């Protein structure tokens, strides 16, 4: 993995990238649908990955149609997720090591997520949250991913030009957002596979965050980031 320009800041997605939350959400949505004798096909769920809660709600209402009680369904999903998340949400492979490297090199870090600030505090340990110089959540923007606003706001808050930021994402909408903002984007697939569109919009497809750490650890990459 070789970056086209020196990396001067690294911006992380959260769900599916830093923490393993997408699978529990998928399972809760499908279980709640089955409880009301409905079906939530996997492609419908996949279309919700990386979007805001409001957009996901619109997808659900359109899919389930007349007579669908969104409020009751959402309450059941929250109940199922509370149980799942009480067990704990693990960091994704390589996350801790990459964050440690960025601490060592002094590269600024930001978090850009379609989730709420409450969800961030729920899913990330306080010591991880504290390591980000800025955080853009669903409450921070008017337009969520795939719009570029979340990433542009993060770059502005960091004081780094978007083109010099490395954006790490697992979702298609997240990559679209980072690419539209003019950033160097790397996709680390979770539930969604890399497509031809994703390959065109990224500088690399990584298997895990360990790969990103290895690329940033290269002597030439480290030296370039400090120039």
Image: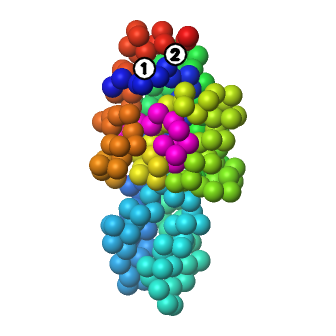
User: Hey, which quadrant is residue 53 in on the image?
Assistant: bottom right
Residue sitting at the far bottom: 67
Q: Are marks 2 and 1 in contact (CB under 8 Å)?
A: yes
Residue at the location (51% across, 36% down)? 183
Compared to residue 139, the image places residue 223 above or below, namely: above
Disc 2 and disc 1: Cα gap in Å? 9 Å
| Lower sequence index among marks 2 and 1 | 1
Q: Position of residue 60 (x, y in %)?
A: 48, 74
The image's colouring method is rainbow
Q: Please identify the quadrant where the N terminus is shown.
A: top left
- Quarter occupied by residue 206: top left
Q: Nearer the viewer, residue 77 or 10?
A: 10
Q: Which residue is mark 1?
A: 216
Q: Is residue 52 visible?
A: yes
Q: Is residue 49 left or right of residue 107?
A: left
Does residue 185 appear to the left or right of 135 in the view shown? left
Say whether residue 219 is magenta: no
Q: Identify residue for label 2.
A: 225
Residue 43: x percent and y percent?
Answer: 34, 67
Judged left or right of residue 199, residue 14 is right
Q: Which residues are magenta?
A: 177-191
Task: Check if residue 190 falls in the magenta segment.
Answer: yes
- Where residue 188 sits, quadrant-wise, is top left
Give 208 or 215, whichever is nearer the viewer: 215
Question: Where in the figure is residue 9, as x and y percent of width and height?
Answer: 56, 26
Residue 127 located left or right of residue 216 = right
């Amino acid at each position: 993995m070789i970056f086209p320009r020196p990396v001067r800041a690294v911006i992380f997605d959260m769900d599916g990238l830093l923490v393993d939350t997408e699978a529990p959400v998928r399972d809760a949505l499908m279980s709640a649908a089955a409880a009301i004798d409905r079906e939530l096909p996997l492609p419908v769920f996949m279309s919700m990955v990386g979007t805001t809660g409001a957009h996901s709600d619109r997808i659900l209402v359109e899919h389930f149609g007349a007579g669908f009680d969104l409020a009751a369904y959402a309450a059941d999903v929250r109940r199922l997720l509370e149980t799942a998340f009480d067990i704990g949400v693990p960091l994704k492979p390589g996350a801790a090591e990459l964050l440690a490297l960025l601490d060592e090199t002094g590269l600024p870090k930001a978090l850009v997520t379609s989730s709420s600030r409450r969800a961030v505090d729920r899913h990330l340990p306080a010591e991880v949250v504290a390591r980000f110089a800025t955080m853009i959540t669903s409450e921070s923007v008017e337009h969520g991913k795939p719009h570029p606003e979340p990433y542009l706001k993060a770059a502005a808050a960091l004081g780094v030009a978007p083109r010099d930021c490395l954006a790490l994402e697992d979702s298609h909408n997240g990559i679209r957002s980072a690419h539209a903002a003019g950033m160097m984007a790397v996709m680390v697939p979770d539930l969604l596979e890399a497509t031809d569109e994703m390959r065109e919009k990224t500088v690399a497809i990584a298997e895990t965050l360990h790969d990103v750490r290895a690329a940033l650890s290269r002597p030439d990459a480290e030296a370039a980031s400090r120039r």
